[in-house]
Image: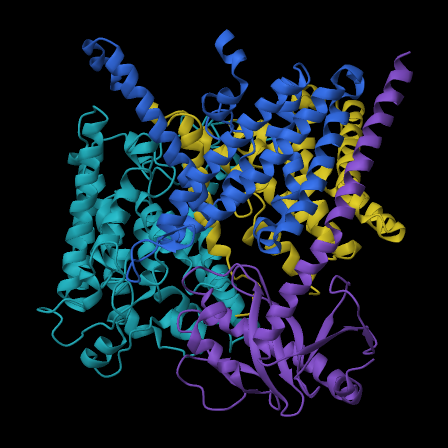
Chain colours: A blue, B purple, C yellow, D cyan
Amino acid sequence: MSQEQDNPFLNGLWKESPVFVQFLGMCPTLAVTNSVRNAIAMGLATTFVLVLTNVLVSSVRKLVPNQVRIATFIAIAATAVTVTDYLVKAISIDIYKALGPFLALIVVNCVILARAEAFAAKNNVSRSFADGLGNGVGFTLGLTMLGTVREVLGAGSFLGVSLFGPNFEPWVLFLLPPGGFITLAFWLLLFAWYRDRKARAAAAPAAMQEVHS
Amino acid sequence: MSSFSIIRCLGLVSLISGVLIVGASLVTKDQIRINQEIIMRDSIAQLLPGVEKQVAYGVEPNGELTRLTSVDAKGPKMFAGYDKQGKLLGVVLEASERGYADIISALYAYDPATKAIVGFSVVEMKETPGLGDKITKDKEFLENFRKLDTSKPIVAVKHGTKKNPWEIDAISGATISSRAVGRMLQKSMTEMAPIVTRHLDRIQRGTE
Amino acid sequence: MNESLGHIFVDSLLINNFVLAVFLGMCPFLGLSSKFQTAWRMGVTVIFVITVSSILAFGTNLMLVALHAEYLRLISFIVIIAATVQLTEMIIKKASPALFRELGIYLPLITTNCAVLAVALFQTVRNYNFIQSTVYAVSASGGFCLAIVLLSLVRERVELSDVPSLARGTALTLVLASILSMAFMGFAGMGGGG
Amino acid sequence: MPGVKTTVIEVRTSPHLHGPLSVDKIMRHVVYALLPIAAFSVWNFGISAGVLLAFTTLGCVLTEHVTCRLNGNRSTVNDYSAAITGLLLGLTLPPGFPLWMAAIGCLVAIAPGKLLFGGLGSNVFNPALVGRAFLQAAFPVAITNYTPALANGRFWEFIPSSLALPLMKSAPLNDWIAQVRVDGFTGATPLVLLKFDRIYSDPWPMFWGQRAGSSGEMPGFLILLCGGYLVVRHMMDWRIPVAMLSGAAVSGWVFHLLNPTAYPDPLFTLFTGGLLLGATFMATDPVASPVTPRGMWVYGVLMGVLTVLIRNLGGLAEGVMYAILLGNALSPLIDRLTPPRPYGARKPAGAI
């Protein structure tokens, strides 16, 4: 536990991955991951909001009375998202269009409030910054992993670069909504299988008998 | 004490929010406008090759035109494109219609001189990848809009059976999306062609 | 584009179902769908909250446009939603204490259900008039209710069977959701006029 | 499904049957009932259909065997249920469907579609249709590439798309169809012709004979005959097919009366596409359908009406598969709303 507390960045990055472990922010996770580019753009926008919110929350944390805690955090998150919205629009309208409504919806992405409430409200600015960055990068990583499977299978390309030549038959399903659910389920099953195998290897070989259920 | 601290907190947060939002909005405002104009200019240049000068009009509900200064304005819009000599090449109009998955919205170029549609490009759609989304890039399909007659009602016909200049040769296997394109153009033309004709002099001058 | 009310209704209820096709409201959809009772009550409450907040958001937006203060849209909508949820909580507490006890912990969570904010934002972006907005709010939230109820029913059925241990939990729920989502693809193109 | 275990004994709660009929025996007879349809399909579409059916059947059985083994369980292939799933999957695919895609359909039908939910008796959805819905969403072009029946040389030459290389596109079929087709038969199914080209086809040839379509969609009389055999042997409940077909016929008729030029007559509705096959062999999956007779009626009628709604109003030409999957999803709700009445008891108040 003490080790986790020491490293808020690494913790958010993988061990407590917002996508695969905490299941926070599922809406953008499934909605904008049909291409790697969108996944990364969404991840970076979320990271920016997370860091900004965490830093702001952490710096005003001692001034916020308990009664208006959540309201204050949401107001801060909404501010950060509005700022991000303007920035993305200024950087590229194409990316802005690809992310569509989900950019504004970052404000209700549970990962923002969850980190503000669970971490930034209790920790100093620099640690909150690291936590926001770690969770943001972890979120981006998760989104990119989903986006990779979906783009490679669904369009036969990676970051828009064709991988298998013109004769490849893309599995269109992966670009469509059911593909989002399936891809996330696939990653979860893969992790479960890996953990299970590791656990089995650690336990005595006799444990093989019990796997039945 | 507690009510004071609540007010202090809310005041502080509103202050921070206000400064950040207004700041971001001011800093990015110009860049956003430039981005939007570039996108608009590029798509008009693509629809009307050789265009040198553009004028944007807003279309009022009563059919009157107003000169626009920003592409951000609300309501239906129309863009007139002119070549080097200032001759009107055509007008770019907006159209949208419900397709297979969701609403398809598009821009198309109309040449009032020949009363024909001379270009078409999809702005937004969610049609099935590999089937309906061919309306955005299928060469054979886009060939329909090099010169599409608008004197008769525009209609999409089965792939390979186009006979008349006002028919659209549908994409095989994507009949619904192709038909939606036909419907959106027909609908937009019935509405907009008379307006363009009525104001043709003014549009051709292109100065007001 | 000026859409007919029928189109808006069928589109947001079935074709572009908020949960199964647009991926909004995923957190309660995955988290609160293990029991039919909970899912059903959550669904109905969400219908109420979304409808009320959509009406309030419509009024607020008119005001913001009149004041040329559109950049405050997101913050205002969030405040409206939080207030609506608070209001719902008070109404339910007064009208049906039993229901209040049952929904208790789930009620405040509706604030972070992105479907609520999405309805308010979408109706503004699409320039819906008042009646269109209301129909949209009712059908979109109805779509959420339908999806979460269907998922809870199939989850309850699977609950009793011998699911491989690896797949228990979220992975299984996601597979069920993807099959539901595939089944809803059958509605595509409805109301397109052929 | 709490609340449905009651005193009423229903012959159709199949995997937990009472009486002398064992699950294995019923399943075996379902396979027998499907074989004539499969044979007719081979006569219609030739070697491609034959190889496709054999391939999907073997594919499903193999997937079930391997997955069970990997899970450390006893293999359950001997209960014939995987064979049924495979046969049904094959019968719902176009005869020239690329075999590598069919293999993926088998994997999806058995692994997530059935075993993930706990195997036979626990599948919430019909596994064959889960597989097919996946294929429809993944390969929308290939799955609508139909070829004409009774093509020349069909017994010694594959439809070119069947043998597409794994993960690769299949060649377009138009040239091949023009070369082999017999007069009067085209590659488009009657439903597609009606929906997209407004061409009406006479329904009776579909009932007796051959048109383009999925490999097992024709002919209607044989499907009814084989289904009838199972009903007579008390191995299948007659209520669901009858309810589904009447739901489709009546709602199709209403559409037809409202606008006879746009919507087809009830006979066309009944005999085209996969309605007969689906209503007889897929909607009746005992696990994924309601348990009470009243529930079965509601369920069947609902699926029939949904089929017609999707066909007539939606963007797709055929809606049977989606109607049945939606019916499967709704069946727990129907179970709740139509609880069986114990003897002497009144209808329970507040069923929901």
* Count of numbered tags: 0
Quarter that holds the N terminus of chain D: top left
| Quarter of the image where one finds residue A205 | top left
Q: In this view, does C162 lie to the left or right of B159?
A: left
Can residue B36 be spotted in the picture? yes
Residue D327: image location, x then y, percent: 44, 46
Q: Is residue C36 left or right of residue D109?
A: right
Residue at figure coordinates x 59%, y 26% from the top left: A132
Vertical relation: B70 (above or below) C120: below
Vertical relation: D348 (above or below) B169: above
Residue at figure coordinates x 18%, y 41% from the top left: D61
Residue D135: image location, x then y, percent: 33, 53
Residue at figure coordinates x 89%, y 22% from the top left: B7
- A181 or D180: which is nearer to us? A181
Quarter that holds the C terminus of chain D: top right
- D245 or B86: which is nearer to us? B86
- C176 or D250: which is nearer to us? C176
Residue at figure coordinates x 80%, y 17% from the top left: A63
Q: Residue furthest front?
A: B84
| Quarter of the image where one finds residue C49 | top right
Residue A5: image location, x then y, percent: 54, 12
Vertical relation: A93 (above or below) B171: above
Residue A4: image location, x then y, percent: 50, 13
Can residue D5 be spotted in the picture? no
